[in-house]
Amino acid sequence: MRAIAEGIWTNESEPRLIGGLDPETGRVVFPCPPGGDYQPHTLSRTGTLWSYTIQRFRPKSPPYAGPEAFQPWAVGYVELPGEVIVESRIVDVAFEDIAIGMPLELTLVPLDPDAPEPVLIHAFKPLGQTTGAAA
Amino acid sequence: MSGDVCIVGIGIHPFGRTDGVSGLDQGVFAVRAALADAGVAWEELQFAYGGSDAAGNPDTMVERLGLTGMQFINVRNGCAAGGSALFSAQMAIKSGEFELGLAVGFDKHPRGAFNALPSEYNLPDWYGDAGYMVTTQFFANKITRYMHLHGISRRTLGLVAEKAFRNAVHAPHAWRREPVALEEILDGAMVSDPYSKYMFCSPAEGGVALILASEKKARELGKPLIRLKAAAMRTRPPKSFEVFAPSVEIGGGTATATQIASAAAFEMAGIGPKDIAIAQLQDTEAGAEIMHMAENGFCKDGDQEAWLAEGRTEIGGALPVNTDGGCLACGEPIGASGLRQVYENVVQLRGAGGGRQVPGEPRTAYTHVYGAPGVSAVTILER
């Protein structure tokens, strides 16, 4: 499976998100903006949940490229300590068990698992949890 | 110019859905109503600023209203379009260049959530592909964090929506004018947790026009002097958490465009939050009204829980908020929405609010809009 776009995460067995570091201010953003103002900066694989919601309706297409058949999904912000807070899908946890402050780690999931050639997006799951263990 | 810029005429096309009438024609309808209200002819207007996001170029309305050759400038500034048109119009008078002109805003959006594209917001395409270009996600994430930090209950969000529909019963220009019980609001279909469908406003249609005059001109027209004491529009500061944000700075969410627009407006007007008698605050969702109460300086973070429980933002309360039902009951035609708030405040300051009139002859009124990608506009009116 291929990434939804190049340059979002590193090509390693345990990938890391690639942010952008402003060398003048030390400010870190995600993703790394194009152009020369920011230096690519790999981010921590683990963090804590900063906020979240459940997407209960299918986003409009365009631009959404997910499956036509819609199942609600969790989306939130994950604080990577000392770096930046990144927006991400939250997976492998029941909606009612999601809580601000819970420890999380990076994973990659298919945008549409049933597509002939699914693309991968970044997501965070409970720290230490095996992928696919919860709905 | 000496004296204040005054609002001498107001007009509105009802918000909601009007099949068969274009957004521009809803704007024209509002302009004609405002001209009649002011008692001036189209030919007398020296300039216009018009805002629309999705319903065409405002200046094409000269075809309908008269080819007088007047200066007409279009404003497209996201959710601050109406506020920006008003800001520009008052500057045109303050500068001394003109003494009588128009700020108009209208829009007509398709049903359902706005479907913004990443390229319009300087974001990569994958961000939209993955399903993140959804404004409701941001609003829900922002209130979830806020509720966690400041002890706001979901019931309080329901109370905001309940008040909106109850106030709108008495606002002829509102869209949703039937009261909805608190339990139905709380138990409604979920859109983006913690918000049910009753806690979000919908994109809609409508038009609003305001005739502005120098104080000298307003006196000549013999109109009651509704003074525009402040109009400020600001963009986002560092540490803000805004719509369509793939990332937020550590410690983010503590500063907002609203805070700096509000502070600037209060400084211009020379008064503070405690001096305001009525406030129209951006309530694209129930939690926005809650957070904006604090961001605009009317209460401390967390105090909203008690304010709502005690009814302090009701029509008869200490600070009535969204007296016509706000965006929750009127819907949000982007170009017109901010001007609707000013329209409602003029109605209230004139004492013409009927069943929704704030008692005690209010003399000061405040408006606030907020929108993507982190813009805010504030006005303060005085009678």
Image (tube, helix red, strand yellow):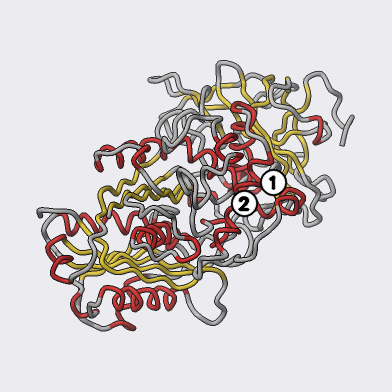
Q: CA distance from mark 2 to mark 1?
A: 15 Å
Q: Is residue B13 left or right of residue B134?
A: left
Determine which of the numbered discs, if any, sits on residue B46 in the image. Answer: none
The subunit letter for the residue under badge 1 reads: B
Task: Locate residue B375, reporting x and y percent.
Answer: 42, 45
Chain letter of the residue carrying label 2: B
Q: Residue at x 49, y 34 (%)?
A: A33
Q: Nearer the viewer, residue B304 or B203?
A: B304
Left or right of B52, for residue B247: right
- Name the image quarter holding residue B271: top left
Q: Which residue is rendered at x = 55% and y = 54% of the image?
A: B116
Quadrant of the snapshot with the C terminus of chain A: top right
User: Is residue B79 positioned above or below B70 on the image?
Assistant: above
Q: Secondary structure at mark 2?
A: helix
Q: Are marks 2 and 1 in contact (CB under 8 Å)?
A: no
Q: Identify which residue, B269 or A59, lies in the foreground.
A: B269
Amino acid type, mark 2: Ala
Q: Is residue B287 left or right of residue A67?
A: left
Q: Earlier in the sequence, mark 2 or mark 1?
A: 2
Disc 2 target residue: B161
Front-lying residue, B322 or B264:
B322
Residue matched to label 1: B192
Percent coordinates x, y for residue B152 in the rendering: 63, 33
**Residue neighbourhood size for the residue with mark 2, other residues' Cα within 10 Å, grouped as few (<14), some (14–19), many (≥20):** many
Residue type, mark 1 in image = Ser
Q: Is residue B172 above or below residue A70?
A: below
Residue sitting at the far top: A82
Expressed as whole percent of the image width and height from the top left, the position of residue A81 reads 60, 17
Do discs 2 and 1 share a chain?
Answer: yes
**For the N terminus of chain A, which image quadrant?**
top right
Residue B141 percent across, percent down from the top left: 63, 37
The residue sitting at the right extreme is A133
